[in-house]
Amino acid sequence: MTVALIALPLACAALVGFLPLGRRVAAGLGLAAVLAELVLAAVAIVNFNVGGGSQFVTDRVWIPNLIGGADVHFHVAMDGLSMFMVALTAVGVASAVWTAIRAGRDRLGLYLGLLLLLEASLVTLFTARDLVLFYTGWEVMMIALFVLMGVWGGERRRFATLQFIIYSLAGSLLMLVAIAGLAVEGHSFDLGVLAAQGRDSWWMFGAFALAFCIKAPMFPLHGWLPDAYRQSTPEVTALLSGVISKAGAYGLIRFAVPLFPATAYHWRWLFLGLGLAGLLYASLVAFRQPDARGVVAYSSVGQMNLIIIGIFVLAPGGVFSDNGLTGATFQMVNHGVVSLAAFLLIGLVELRTGTDALKSLGGLANRRPVASTVFLLAALFALAVPGSSVFISELYILIGAFGEQPLLGAAASLGIVLAAMYMLRWYSAIAHEGDGERIDAATPDLRRSELAVVVPLLLILLVLSAWPFGVMERIG
């Protein structure tokens, strides 16, 4: 199952991206590939044995005796966290492929091929249990993103891509050095073997944490984000926020803390402090953004820093807090779907108006009831209205934070209040102000083909809200 989830998009990426197919054939093949991936992810969730540990395991020697007698293994498996990250990836890429087809992207075959390559790399890093295999997936993900941003981005795409490359390479190269150091000392690249050895090394932990915190991103390592989110196409921005940022949080949970538990516990207050600063700073900045993408972009920074708070609420010995980790992992799923919906909705508006400036988009609700309703639902989930799945995951994080330090929990609660402020402003500025300069009576409501992108995402959030235990039990 796990191998099929990697091989399917990888094979289709080669076919769609490099064969001289027509636009219709490339679109049909790309759409068929992502829909098949969705089916495989659903089958994995249905067949997952709760309490059964890692499942759908494949372990084969890939490169023998690479460093210090350590073999590199093609070792992939899925537990609850990996499974839902794979499912989130499948949902996100399927939405992105359909949006790209609807938008009529130039060189559509190559564009869809890169999206499928991105999907294969994400599934690889979410399921890898070998450090070299994980790093391979991580770097292929970066390569696909570099091309998608640099070729199909906006007017300032070169600067945004260069900035993204510099930040990413700074983290990933240090992580590569730490992986080599672990192999020399531990004579293995296997995550389970190395985690059982339990090293206490501040520089190795720092190298892993830096790479993951840049990608999350954690304050103040978010400098690449504003330009990257604004200059990428809407569907790539949606994947950056909804899925790829979760790869950073996943790396902290799966690798950084388990490999160096004592070091993580010793440095936990640095991450808790920066996470709290990032949550409050990003929430305040989001309220002042002049464009729809900017609001959601800084909202994502704040929410990812809230997730980092949940991760680093640690007990002595680097043991995760049950409440903090449960909230953080559930919030990764919730925020991923919310971000996908928000950025794809903004992309649909940009296709109509050519802009996402809030001053130009007022009055969208007038004569457009479907768009108004969908935007309102997305905003309500983003601000964590009580009863929603987002509210539940944020509550778990706050309970974990209060358990660590009441002042930490109280301060983090302010971020929830600020989220309501900037998301209500976001919706009000788009839907209920007077008609903006780019909105008039001829601006159409959302069409059925466009609803096919966003309505499934909102339905997923409704299902998660109705049955949150179904996710939290499997992740746990």
Image: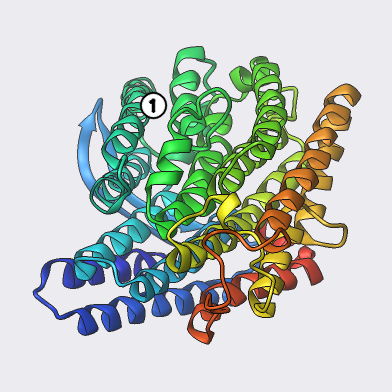
Q: Is residue 147 above or below residue 272?
A: below
Q: Position of residue 113 (x, y in %)?
A: 24, 65
x, y (%) of residue 426? 68, 52
Q: Is residue 300 left or right of residue 238?
A: right
Between 99 and 112, the one lying in front of the other is 99
Image side of residue 50 versus residue 293, left or right: right
Residue at screen point 51% across, 27% down: 197
Q: Observer-nearest residue: 116 or 204? A: 116
Q: Kindly state the secondary structure of the residue where label 1 is placed.
A: helix
Q: Residue at x 34, y 30 (%)?
A: 163
Figure colour scheme: rainbow
Query: Which of the 4 image quadrants contains residue 338?
Result: bottom right
Q: In the depicted view, which residue is nearer to us: 426 or 226?
A: 426
Which quarter of the figure is the N terminus placed in? bottom left
Position of residue 196 measured from the top left corner of the image (x, y, whole percent) = 54, 32
Q: Residue furthest left?
A: 20
Circle 1 packing at 10 Å, graded few (<14), some (14-19), many (20+), is many
Find residue 302 and report its image quarter. Answer: top right
Q: Position of residue 254 (x, y in %)?
A: 54, 40
Amino acid marked by disc 1: Gly
User: Seen in the image, is 187 located left or right of residue 375?
Assistant: left
Residue 5 in view, yes or no: yes
Residue hosting label 1: 171
Can residue 196 be seen from the camera position used here? no
- Above or below 180: residue 202: above
* Residue drawn 58% across the image and 30% down it: 257
